[in-house]
Image (tube, grey):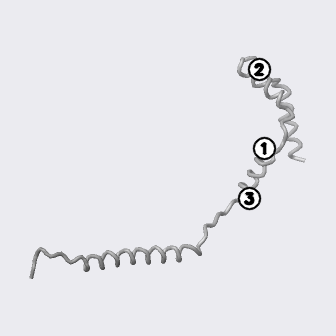
Amino acid sequence: MKINQYNPTPLKAYSENRVRESADRTQSQSQTTAPSRDVVNVSSQARLLGAARQTATESSDVREQKVKELRDQVRAGTYKPDIRKTALNLVREEVDFLR
């Protein structure tokens, strides 16, 4: 018996077997995971918020100039809101809510 002689056949069979097992494992995983699906549940509050955002995005900015003027006033420190008018609007909204 020669010790220096190398026979690659047993090693080749082992490596081919590992490749087959890996391919079989990958195929079986893809078959078992394919039918399952992810499920997402959205609350009614989230749906309402999404609808509100979509409506706001689609609406035209009619008061864009007014908002720009107010933003400039706030940045300059010259914005002086009418506190009496704000209070009256808040009270009116509460009264309308109670009706």
- The residue type indicated by label 3 comes to Ser
Q: Earlier in the sequence, mark 3 or mark 2?
A: 3
Q: Nearer the viewer, residue 20 or 33?
A: 20
Q: Quadrant of the N terminus?
A: bottom left
> Residue 39: x, y in percent?
63, 66
> Residue 78: x, y in percent?
75, 17
- In the picture of the structure, the residue carrying the numbered disc 3 is 44
Q: Earlier in the sequence, mark 1 or mark 2?
A: 1
> Residue 79: x, y in percent?
77, 20
Residue found at x 83% / y 27%: 65
C-alpha separation, residue under disc 1 versus residue under disc 2: 27 Å
- In the picture of the structure, the residue carrying the numbered disc 1 is 57
Give the left or right position of residue 10, taking residue 71 as reference. left
Q: Is residue 48 above or below residue 81?
A: below
Give the left or right position of residue 42, taking residue 92 as reference. left
Residue 79 - label: 2
Q: Earlier in the sequence, mark 3 or mark 1?
A: 3
The residue carrying pointer 1 sits among few (fewer than 14), some (14 to 19) or many (20 or more) residues within 10 Å by Cα, namely few
Residue that protrudes farthest toward the bottom in the picture: 1
Residue 6 - label: none
Q: Is residue 82 above or below residue 17?
A: above
Give the structural element (helix, strand or loop) at label 3. helix
C-alpha separation, residue under disc 3 versus residue under disc 1: 20 Å
